[in-house]
Amino acid sequence: PGDFKTFGKDTPFDIAVNAFKVSNDAYTVDATFRAANSLSGADRSANLAFKAVSTYNEKYDAYIRKIVRNIINEAYKNPDAQQNPVFKQFTERYTAEQAYSIVYPAIPNFAPLGKMVQSANASYQGASDMASGDITLSELEFSAAPYGITGNGTGKMTKGQMFPAMNVNLACSNCLRMIDDIAAYADRVHKAAVYFDPKGAASMAANPRLVEGIKNFLAALADSAGDASSFRYAIVSDGAMGVTINGKPMDQVMALYAQHVGNAMQPASGSSLPPQ
């Protein structure tokens, strides 16, 4: 539009990036993007879609480690950084090389994840004020080679209802391994954080019982037709307060959560606080 200030939800537009590609000896990225909005009388049609496919190899991971090492070395040389009492205390106890050794386990490795995909495609067709109409989620994916989450679904907005009625299907492939990997990385970050802020890091401590509780909860909630580590979930909402997951109403879902996750968050029987 001539005046950008007039740009709003009623402005028709169609923005598309049909191809965005980067390729070198460390990584490749292939992405697309589209955002569109159009009006026809009292009707609106809108779409938001994106997809990014990327792979990273050992050269990329080595490059990230080199950047982290350089940042640490520069921080040790920077007199302004020494004004921070926490950092000053840390530098008095550890050399720059020791600091890198502490941080090293927390640096993520992307190469083992193989091909990674982040994508979504959602559209709306209905009233121009978006108070009533149909929503379609034709594609949803956040995945890596070992595991990932995919989904699709539909929704219907009705005037006077707070939430749209929805029917969403989600699939978690190799879900248990994904949770284990997330927990293992969180533990690595925690062990590094202890050196910088022991008290603050205490709240980040990994709880193996909680990790198992989350896995058991997701398994108990999953479609029984799924295999031992890949789960499916059908989420249905009536647009009011009625929500079911794989046919289980929310009171049953919360009971399963309390059984598996809630109990795991409680101190183990006979446990005691570690000495200070």
Image (cartoon, rainbow, N blue to C red):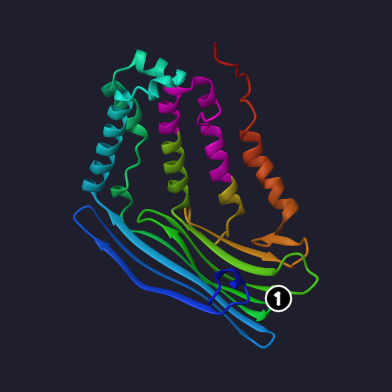
| Amino acid on which the number 1 mark rests in the picture | Asp
Q: How many marks?
A: 1
Q: Is 188 part of what is drawn in magenta?
A: yes
The span shown in magenta is 187-216
| Residue at (58, 72) in percent of width and height | 7
| Residue at (40, 17) in percent of width and height | 88
Q: What predominant SS class does the magenta segment belong to?
A: helix
Query: Furthest-bottom residue in view?
Result: 41
Q: Residues within 10 Å of mark 1 (few under 14, many from 20)?
A: few
Q: Give the residue number, with chain letter if any, for mark 1.
A: 129
Q: Is 270 part of what is drawn in magenta?
A: no
Seen in the picture, residue 176 relative to 47 is either above or below; the reply is above
Find residue 268 and report its horizontal and vertical position in percent.
Answer: 61, 25
Specify whether 190 is left or right of 223: left
Find residue 152 and report its horizontal and vertical position in percent.
Answer: 54, 69
Q: 164 and 225: which one is in front?
A: 164
Q: 203 and 212: which one is in front?
A: 203
| Residue at (63, 25) in percent of width and height | 267
Q: Quadrant of residue 62?
A: top left
Query: Furthest-top residue in view?
Result: 275
- Give the SS element for disc 1: loop
Specify whether 15 is left or right of 40: left
Query: Furthest-right residue in view?
Result: 160
Q: Quadrant of the C terminus?
A: top right
Q: 221 and 13: which one is in front?
A: 13
| Residue at (37, 34) in percent of width and height | 106
Find residue 30 and report its horizontal and vertical position in percent.
Answer: 32, 65
Q: Quadrant of residue 142?
A: bottom left
